[in-house]
Image (cartoon, rainbow, N blue to C red):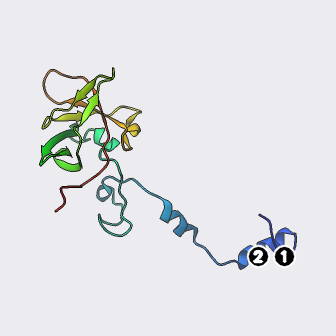
Amino acid sequence: AMTSSSNDFASWVEDQLALPVGSHREFYRSRTNPKYEFSYKVGATGPRPCELHSRWRRYALSSLDGLSNRKTGWNKHLTVDLINGKYIWKVDGSFRTVTTTFPIGHTKGGTERPLVLGHRYKIIHKQGYSWVADCVGCPVSVMPSSGDDTSEILVGNPEVSVAGIEG
């Protein structure tokens, strides 16, 4: 708003220059949230996990999980194991989250399809639709890695949790 001691543009500019200096860069950087999944690979700097200002996502599976490795062409795989009454979700053997409810997916037709514990499921990249998986509860497409079954299963993306397995 153009408010100043007098009602002309020059005095408004002088009043603005007299205000305390603020940093647009500091304001901008404190509110941006880059989503580097592997920041160490692209040379980005930033806090390490558990350091002040480190950034985390709430969902366990990322749309990047559906992309195949550029060098090998291999896809990432999801497994869910039952350990001490908790369902442990892993991608290529790396822990992602723990849930207390049995993971049930759905076919494209809407039929319930429970995941088989310990079974490997290929995470599928949907060209042009991969971003839809990047939220809690959003559908992630998986497919059994072995056998004759090649039907797609949509699994709700679980929230990241370590409850009950700390230590």
Residue in the foreground of this view, choosing between 140 and 131: 140
Using residue 46 as the reference point, say whether residue 150 is left or right of it.
Answer: left
Callout 2, which amino acid?
A: Asp
Query: Which numbered circle lies on residue 5?
Result: 1
Question: x and y percent of residue 48 in the render?
Answer: 30, 65
Query: Could you tell me if residue 121 is visible in this image?
Result: yes
> Is mark 1 in CB contact (under 8 Å) with mark 2?
yes
The image shows residue 142, relative to residue 44, as above or below, that is above
- For label 2, the residue is 15
Query: Could you tell me if residue 67 is visible in this image?
Result: no
Using residue 82 as the reference point, say whether residue 105 is left or right of it.
Answer: right
Residue at (87%, 69%) from the top-left corner? 8
Name the element at disc 2. Answer: helix
**Which of the 4 quarters of the picture holds residue 147?**
top left
Question: x and y percent of residue 39 in the render?
Answer: 32, 57
Instruction: Name the image quarter holding the N terminus.
Output: bottom right
Q: Residue furthest right?
A: 7
Using residue 31 as the reference point, say whether residue 5 is left or right of it.
Answer: right
Question: x and y percent of residue 53 in the render?
Answer: 39, 67
Mark 1, Cα crowd under 10 Å, few <14 / some 14-19 / many 20+, is few
